[in-house]
Image (spheres, rainbow, N blue to C red):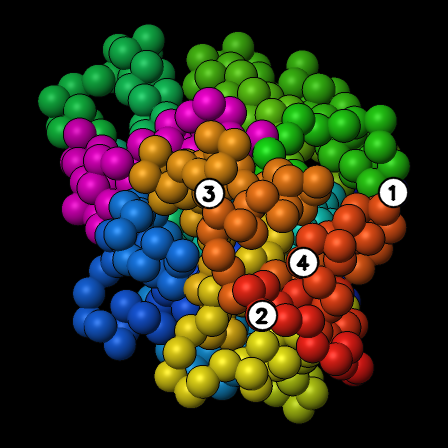
Amino acid sequence: MFKKTAWYPPACGLLVTAVIILMLPKYSYNDPDTFWHLEVGRYMLEQGKVLHQAIHTFYGDQLPYIPHEAGFQLLIAPLYHWFGWPGIYLLTALCLFGLIMGLMRLGKVSRRELGLGEDHILLLPFVLLISCWIYYNYFKGRPQMVSSPLIVWFFVYLREYQMKSRAIYAAVMILLSCAVANVHTGVWLVIAVFTGMAVLESLITRRLHWKRAAVFMLVLLAGLPNPGGLKGLLFIFTVTRNHYNLLINEWQPLAFSRLDQLPILLLLLFFAITLPYALQRKPFRFFLMAGILYLGVSNFKQNLFMWLFIPYFASVFFEAVSLVSRSRMRLSERAVALGLTAGLLFNTVSIFTVPPVTAAGDYPVLEMNYVLEHTPAGKRPKVLSSYGSSGYVMFRGGDVLCDGRQDPFITKASAGVMGWNAFERSMYGFSEYLPDIVSYDHPDYVIVRSGGSGRLYQDWVKDLGTPVYKGSYGSVFRTGDPPRTLGSQ
């Protein structure tokens, strides 16, 4: 009954288009880090150089900064300058196209490694399903949306090369290694780890001849010419020093019992189910399983890798689904590509027709309007705000205590009151210690978000004076001057 089941090109294309249209573009840009990425990119283009110091801070331009995302910042800054937020979506759409095509190819390569037919009726809907999750959770105007397809395609060509040592596969691997190192340097270590797994596989199977070893060495060397150098490649060890990264939500351990993380729990369980079918006593698959399992349960930020590589395991597990185990599909990659193009064009037209605006309840939009209206032209006000909003403040024209770059602000040079560095003061500061931090750092304005403790807020009013403005996001305190009349929205 199912033996002749097939996906025909029109059906493939229509399914892909329908799913892509459901990936609403207005949800693809609103991330706190995007704002400072844009400002850093704009500044680098204006100055004609890559930044190695943090800019727009209470410390001037003196704190050292590792440019581990310079390539991404230089990509999005001109797009935003020319087209606004819809310009960012142009890059998002291109990356989503590359990711979905890469995930399809990843599943096919996995099946071919084990001597199975490349196509399976469940592969396309499965890839589309996990692509939706990746899009809504990770494609938000951050470098992950560029590095994800690059890493997936690197892995695809690595496996192709291991099956057949063609020069074109080697060349693409080297180029992709260099691209990842320059766009999102901090995740390049994944490239190095995958390459190391391939080296071990070649040793075990006795296929590590000098040409193959030379290719692997060139892949590793291709990562070195990047703006951050070796420090950029090893950036993970900087941000995890003293566990400072655990103060940020997305770096904290996953809480699998929480309802909002149910999809992550289901993914982990599904991953475990696939292993008996997918490993097939292949050493590389075992190495990959161990690495992806470690990353997948570490934190939300690294859980992305489990979503990216689940097609590699699931595409083999599909053979165990008895209902469709004998089904075969004729999957047209051209039809999938055309469907992707149609859906992404539709979304692009929609976002250019109705461009998104920054949500005034999520970021201090109105509050910064007030601050800038009361700041002399050409001067950047010093604004103390929370870690999650400081990127927006910097983007709008303020100097901040700390922003999403984190690494400049955990240095001893930024140490201050309570012995806390700037990052700690930013994370701990909106508490009973806020008046002490204000007294030490001397900001011109303090922006606090609504919805916090009423008792704390009243204590801040006693120490900082009556807010000079209240907007949709929160309250603005002017420090150092006599209290002014309370503004309104």
Whichever of callouts 3 and 4 sits on the residue coming sooner in the sequence is 3
> What amino acid does circle 1 point to?
Met
Q: What is the magenta segment's predominant secondary structure?
A: helix
Q: Which residue is mark 3?
A: 422
Residue type at mark 2 is Asp
Real-space Cα separation, disc 1 to disc 2, in angstroms: 81 Å
Cα–Cα gap, marks 3 and 2: 24 Å
The magenta-colored residue range is: 217-246
Mark pair 3, 1: CA separation: 66 Å
Q: Is residue 158 visible?
A: no
Residue 355, given in percent of the width and then of the height, sits at 65, 84
Q: Mark 1 = which residue?
A: 1
Q: Earlier in the sequence, mark 2 or mark 4?
A: 4
For label 2, the residue is: 481
Which residue occupies 76% across, 73% down?
Answer: 470
Q: Of marks 4 and 1, which one's residue comes earlier in the chain?
A: 1
Residue 472 to residue 372: above or below: above
Q: Secondary structure at mark 3?
A: helix
Which-is-in-front pick, marks 3 and 4? 4
Q: Residues within 10 Å of mark 2 (few under 14, many from 20)?
A: few
Marker count (numbered) = 4
- Quadrant for the N terminus, please: top right
Q: Which label sits in the foreground, 1 or 2?
A: 2
Which mark is first along the chain, 2 or 3? 3
How far is mark 3 from mark 4, CA to CA?
20 Å
Q: Amino acid at mark 3?
A: Ala
Residue depicted at 59% across the width and 57% down the height = 385
